[in-house]
Image (cartoon, rainbow, N blue to C red):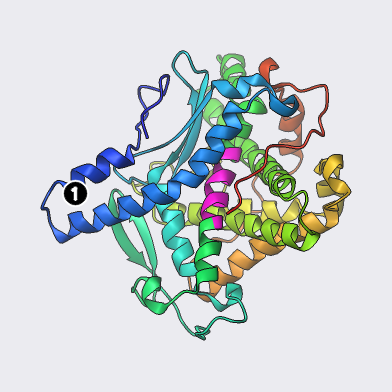
């Protein structure tokens, strides 16, 4: 994967082929050979979501979508496998914006799924092995190294035996996981979050520094909740659109898988909060620019109340996939992730329901947001979105 023209100069770039060739050309240590194997797996699995996301962006202007999406770059960064992150921001000319997912994040999704798919809560009835009492350690990537967390068996799940169906499911989830993160970051761009932050920097120019920091952090937390909501609705619409001629049962199955991917991303963010790659410098929660991951998980479950979800579900999809069925499937997928996570004995945070960025403040922010002019689509707001990759 070649670094695209316009990719921000200050951002890293994950060139998997170059990295893999470097490791293969060295005799190295067993650790080097292990990293080489990890890079090869990552490089192979990244091709599906990367291809879909590039096609989605390059298809700007098709189907009533704005051509401005062609000016957004996407890629995997962070060749050092440092931490858990996804980001968006201005790009260099000739592009306008860029969205990056850390290659460590993608690999972390793979390692977590490899273990979660051994939980009996998500194994098919035909699975040959009963793993009802099996607990596995969580393998975390941090600062280019691997560390085991929690009690359990440290062995690679592949040594325990997964069925072909489970491997196929894992490949599909490895598309849905980065697609959710991509859509979350895309929301920050197309819904005007970046523009709003820039405007507020000017509006608060004469405020006290502590007031600015607290207000900025509160705004950011509110917009994280909004971006999660948008990513779920857009992703669910993609899934259903890609299965337009399939029976409702198949759509429901894939919506559950997408919900599972949503839940996994938020739980992995929680792990990064508990075990950060660098010591925290902020101790006041009011200055955190991201919400407690447990709170985000509860919020994503809350938005599936009948009235709220139905109000956001595209009318064009209502006929063959009722909003009620769609929201129940996605919520079931999120719940399933939590059950599997708990079954393996992995730690997670309680929700901070008193976060002032939730509730009325979040909706106040949403009313102030405006999409940049190039992303506005007044003609047909219910236009079905591009299909998501289906394996």
Q: How many marks?
A: 1
Q: Quadrant of residue 298?
A: bottom right
Magenta extent: 172-183
Give the percent coordinates (x, y) of residue 147.
31, 61
Q: Quadrant of residue 140?
A: bottom left
Give the percent coordinates (x, y) of residue 236.
71, 48
Residue that appears at 67% across and 28% down? 191
Give the percent coordinates (x, y) of residue 59.
62, 28
Is 361 on the left or on the right of 208, as rendered? Answer: right
Is 84 on the left or on the right of 16, as rendered? Answer: right
Residue that appears at 77% across and 55% down? 327
Q: Is residue 175 magenta?
A: yes
Residue that appears at 85% across and 51% down? 320
Q: Is residue 1 magenta?
A: no
Q: 28 and 369: which one is in front?
A: 28
**Above-or-below relation of 113 to 67:** below
Give the percent coordinates (x, y) of residue 260.
61, 59
Residue 110 visible? The answer is yes
The residue indicated by pointer 1 is: 24
Q: Quadrant of the N terminus?
A: top left
Q: Quadrant of the C terminus?
A: bottom right
Q: Residues within 10 Å of mark 1 (few under 14, many from 20)?
A: some
Residue that appears at 56% across and 71% down? 340
Taking the view exactly as shown, the residue that stands out farthest to the left is: 27
Is 312 on the left or on the right of 49, as rendered? Answer: right
Residue 79 visible? The answer is no
**Above-or-below relation of 263 to 366:** below
Label the magenta part by its dominant secondary structure: helix
Is 75 on the left or on the right of 23, as rendered? Answer: right
- For label 1, the SS is helix
């Amino acid at each position: 994967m070649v670094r695209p023209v316009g990719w921000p100069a200050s951002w890293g770039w994950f060139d998997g082929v170059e990295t893999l060739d470097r490791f293969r050309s060295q005799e190295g240590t067993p650790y080097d050979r292990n990293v080489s194997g990890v890079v090869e797996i990552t490089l192979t699995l990244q091709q599906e979501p990367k291809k879909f996301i590039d096609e989605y962006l390059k298809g700007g202007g098709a189907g009533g979508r704005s051509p401005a999406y062609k000016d957004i770059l996407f890629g995997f960064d962070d060749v050092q496998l440092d931490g858990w992150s996804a980001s968006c921001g201005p790009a260099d000319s000739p592009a306008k914006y860029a969205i990056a997912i850390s290659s460590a994040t993608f690999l972390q999704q793979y390692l977590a799924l490899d273990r979660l798919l051994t939980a009996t809560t998500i194994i098919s009835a035909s699975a040959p092995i009963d793993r009802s009492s099996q607990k596995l350690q969580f393998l975390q990537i941090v600062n280019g190294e691997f560390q085991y967390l929690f009690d359990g068996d440290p062995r690679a799940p592949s040594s325990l035996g997964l069925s072909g169906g489970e491997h196929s499911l894992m490949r599909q989830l490895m598309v849905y996981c980065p697609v959710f993160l991509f859509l979350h970051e895309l929301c920050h761009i197309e819904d005007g979050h970046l523009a709003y932050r820039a405007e507020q920097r000017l509006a608060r120019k004469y405020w006290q520094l502590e007031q600015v920091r607290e207000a900025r952090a509160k705004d950011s937390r509110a917009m994280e909740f909004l971006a999660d909501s948008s990513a779920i609705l857009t992703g669910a619409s993609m899934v259903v659109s890609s299965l337009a001629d399939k029976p409702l049962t198949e759509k429901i199955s894939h919506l559950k898988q997408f919900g599972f991917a949503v839940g996994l991303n938020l739980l992995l963010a929680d792990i990064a909060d508990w075990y950060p790659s660098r010591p925290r410098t902020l101790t006041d929660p009011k200055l955190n620019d991201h919400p407690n991951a447990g709170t985000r998980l509860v919020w994503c479950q809350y938005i599936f109340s009948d009235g709220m979800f139905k109000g956001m579900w595209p009318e064009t999809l209502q006929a063959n996939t009722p909003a009620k069925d769609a929201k129940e499937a996605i919520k079931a997928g999120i719940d399933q992730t939590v059950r599997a996570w708990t079954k393996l004995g992995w730690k997670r945070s309680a929700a901070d329901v008193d976060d002032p960025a939730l509730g009325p403040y979040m909706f106040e922010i949403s009313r102030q947001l405006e999409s940049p002019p190039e992303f506005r689509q007044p003609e047909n707001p219910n236009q079905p979105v591009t299909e998501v990759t289906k394996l």
